[in-house]
Amino acid sequence: MTVKWQITGFDELSTRQLYAILRLRQEVFAVEQTSIYVDPDGLDLDAIHICAWENDRLMAYERCLPPGLQETESTLGRIVVAREARGRDLGRELVRRGISHNRQRWPDSNIRIHAQAYLERFYQELGFVTDGDQYELDGIPHLEMTLTAAAEK
């Protein structure tokens, strides 16, 4: 099946697309990972949303935030792959697209992520460096990781 990639601002998302995004985030982060938190945190409004669609079904998603909105650096967040799409390297492609977007849009900014700790090696393979000690966020161990603006693309 063919994956179609979409990069869009919040106001360009259709109601159905927004519903699919919120549903996928809820299915994985709240239900599968049993983490209770307020997902719509106000940052989606100013984010760029990267989606991977397959036959109108959302397979992977992340949001890209500008420097100064959540962190001093630009950020990637809410990185998620649907259960049925895992093992197909969609997550790796998704993060690469997010890195590419942030570098093009904010070329002088580092990229920061709040990564779930068990994914540290995955993000390291994409060039991120662990920045600080492990901490708990919404009941899940996390690490802050950074990709410097000078890092090789």
Image: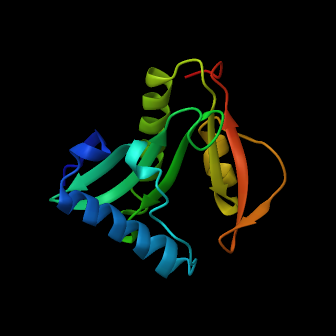
Q: How many marks do you count on the picture? A: 0
Task: Judge left or right: residue 105 versus residue 54.
Answer: right
Where residue 113 appears, as percent x and y from the top left, is: 62, 46
> Where, quadrant-wise, is the N terminus in this rendering?
bottom left
Q: How is the image coloured?
A: rainbow
Where residue 39 appears, as percent x and y from the top left, is: 48, 66
Q: Residue at x 64, y 52 (%)?
A: 114
Where residue 54 appears, as percent x and y from the top left, is: 21, 56
Q: Residue at x 64, y 54 (%)?
A: 115
Task: Judge left or right: residue 124 versus residue 78.
Answer: right
Frontmost residue, 152 versus 28: 28
Q: Residue at x 65, y 18 (%)?
A: 150
Name, please, the residue furthest toward the left. 55
**Above or below: residue 69 compared with residue 13:** above
Task: Judge left or right: residue 36 versus residue 10.
Answer: right
Task: Judge left or right: residue 33 versus residue 93.
Answer: right
**Above or below: residue 80 compared with residue 68:** below
Q: Is residue 47 visible?
A: no
Q: Is residue 102 visible?
A: yes
Indicate the quadrant where residue 128 lies. Answer: top right
Indicate the quadrant where residue 98 lies. Answer: top left
Frontmost residue, 21 versus 28: 21
Where residue 53 appears, as percent x and y from the top left, is: 24, 54
> Where, quadrant-wise, is the C terminus in this rendering?
top right
**Above or below: residue 114 compared with residue 152:** below
Frontmost residue, 12 versus 80: 12
